[in-house]
Image: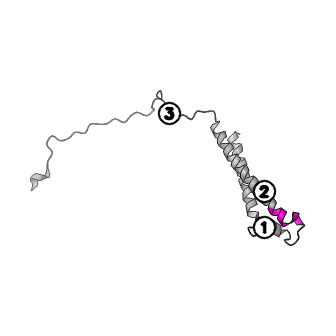
Amino acid sequence: MSTFSIFLILIVIVAFLLVVVVMVQNPKGGGLSSSFGGGGTQQLGGVKKTSDFLDKSTWALATLLIALILLSNVAISDGGTTTESKALDQDATTSQPLPTTTPVETPANPVSNDSAQ
């Protein structure tokens, strides 16, 4: 398994976790804490601590996702093969033959439409 494949799997997992964490949050302050009782301040550390945890985990997962994407870009270029263009290589030969052109013969006395009047 290549390094890029490992990064790709990690990116998919982190992206899925980021979607889950964002979907659990409620923009009006309810979210995860309201589903566990809402009124009680002692459940799961209270509303403030739950929203702080979700906020910090969102930022951490987003940062991790960006870092993994940048590292996967480095993993792609370390493939061991050169990425130089073959168009610039003067020693390269073409594998396809060039098309041959046949000369088009033009008539010696073209008929003009001016004499038809």
Query: Splitting the image into 4 quarters, where does residue 31 fall?
Result: bottom right
Give me the C-alpha separation between circle 2 and circle 1. Answer: 15 Å
Instruction: Tell which circle, 2 or 1, labels the residue nearer the N-terminal end.
Output: 1
| The magenta segment | 43-51
Query: Residue beneath label 2, please?
Result: 56
Instruction: Tell which circle, 2 or 3, labels the residue nearer the N-terminal end.
Output: 2
Q: Residue at x 70, y 40 (%)?
A: 3
The structure's colour scheme is one colour
Q: Residue at x 65, y 43 (%)?
A: 73
Image coordinates of residue 56 in percent, x first then y, are 78, 56
Give me the C-alpha separation between circle 1 and circle 3. Answer: 56 Å
| Magenta span contains residue 42 | no
Q: Secondary structure at mark 3?
A: loop
**Residue type at the position of mark 1:** Gly
Query: Residue beneath label 1, please?
Result: 31
Instruction: Tell which circle, 1 or 3, labels the residue nearer the N-terminal end.
Output: 1
Q: Is residue 6 above or below residue 115?
A: above
Residue nearest the observer in this picture, 69 or 5:
69
Give me the C-alpha separation between circle 2 and circle 3. Answer: 48 Å
The quarter in which the N terminus is drawn is: top right
**Residue type at the position of mark 2:** Lys
Q: Is residue 116 above or below residue 36?
A: above
Q: Secondary structure at mark 2?
A: helix
Query: Residue beneath label 3, please?
Result: 86
Image coordinates of residue 105 in percent, x first then y, are 22, 39
